[in-house]
Image (spheres, rainbow, N blue to C red):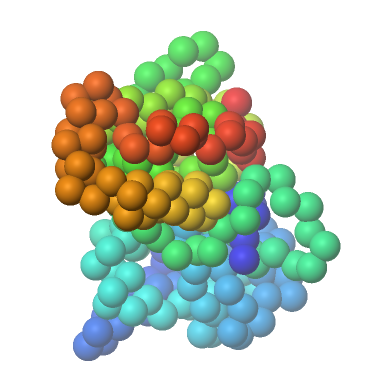
Amino acid sequence: MFTGIVQGIATVEHITDRPGLRSITLRLPAGFADGLAIGASVSTDGVCLTVTALHGEDAAAFDVMLQSLNTTSLGALTPGSRVNVERAAKDGAEIGGHPLSGHIDFTATVAEVLTPENNRVLRVQVPAPWMRYVFAKGYIAINGASLTVAEADRRAGWFEVWLIPETLRMTTFAEKAPGDALNIEIERQTQVFVDSVRDALDERLGPLMPLLEQFLAERGLGTEVLTGAPPGLGGGLRS
């Protein structure tokens, strides 16, 4: 498990491809590898990877399976690429963000970058089936960072996050531009809530469900509004 509080930025040093597998060597932030062991888990742009080899005091190798390469942004990494990293949480660790599994649900795209004074805003375009799990003031994890959704437009399929200077200093978000891919892990309690509501409505309404969904979609809403959206939650590494 991870906390969603990014601990630094690592740089891709070397990539080796084998059939169905890619080995990535990362140069880690100073002090990050203290006590790191083979078999340990490290969140790499939000993807849980296992240390397969250690190189000196501040570099480690990770194997990435084909499925992860195809379903996350890790498949596009090249030597020199920079990624957010976090060590696995220890028992009793402070959860400054929200619990993350390191299992990516989907990739989204940076649609627009806004730069108000002392802030940076990312507008993120989301594939339609996943937008039902995104709520203003709720948690979401982007490239391993726990963030709070500032605004969400369900009809247009986007949400925004605001990033303060400290977040930009500790992550790669300052480097993101329109068109860049982002790894997204949705908040599990929100997913369970939304799916439970949808299942209950489908069971009770049966044939009327498609008409109800169409009616709500035309108004930029989802079926979760029938019972109330999940309560707003704060997020780590946010404004």
Question: Which of the 4 image quadrants contains residue 78?
Answer: bottom left
Q: Position of residue 218 (x, y in %)?
A: 19, 25
Is residue 171 among the parts visible in the rendering?
no
- Counting labels gives 0
Which residue is painted at 26% across and 59% down in the image?
76
Residue lying furthest bottom in this view?
19
| Quadrant housing the C terminus | top right
Up the image or down, 147 lies above or below 185; here it is above
Up the image or down, 158 lies above or below 118; here it is below
Q: Nearer the viewer, residue 219 or 43?
A: 219
Q: Position of residue 179 (x, y in %)?
A: 23, 38
| Quadrant housing the N terminus | bottom right
Question: Which of the 4 image quadrants contains residue 29?
Answer: bottom right
Which residue is painted at 63% across and 40% down in the image?
236
Which residue is painted at 67% across and 58% down in the image?
30
Q: Where is residue 182 in the image (x, y as percent from the top left)?
A: 35, 47
Which residue is painted at 23% across and 35% down in the image?
212
Up the image or down, 147 lies above or below 80; here it is above
Q: Which of 227 and 52 is in front in this view?
A: 227
Residue lying furthest top in this view?
117
Q: Is residue 91 left or right of residue 116?
A: right
Is residue 34 among the parts visible in the rendering?
yes
Q: In this view, does 156 lie to the left or right of 90?
A: left
Q: Where is residue 8 in the image (x, y as percent from the top left)?
A: 60, 51
Q: Nearer the viewer, residue 22 or 124?
A: 124
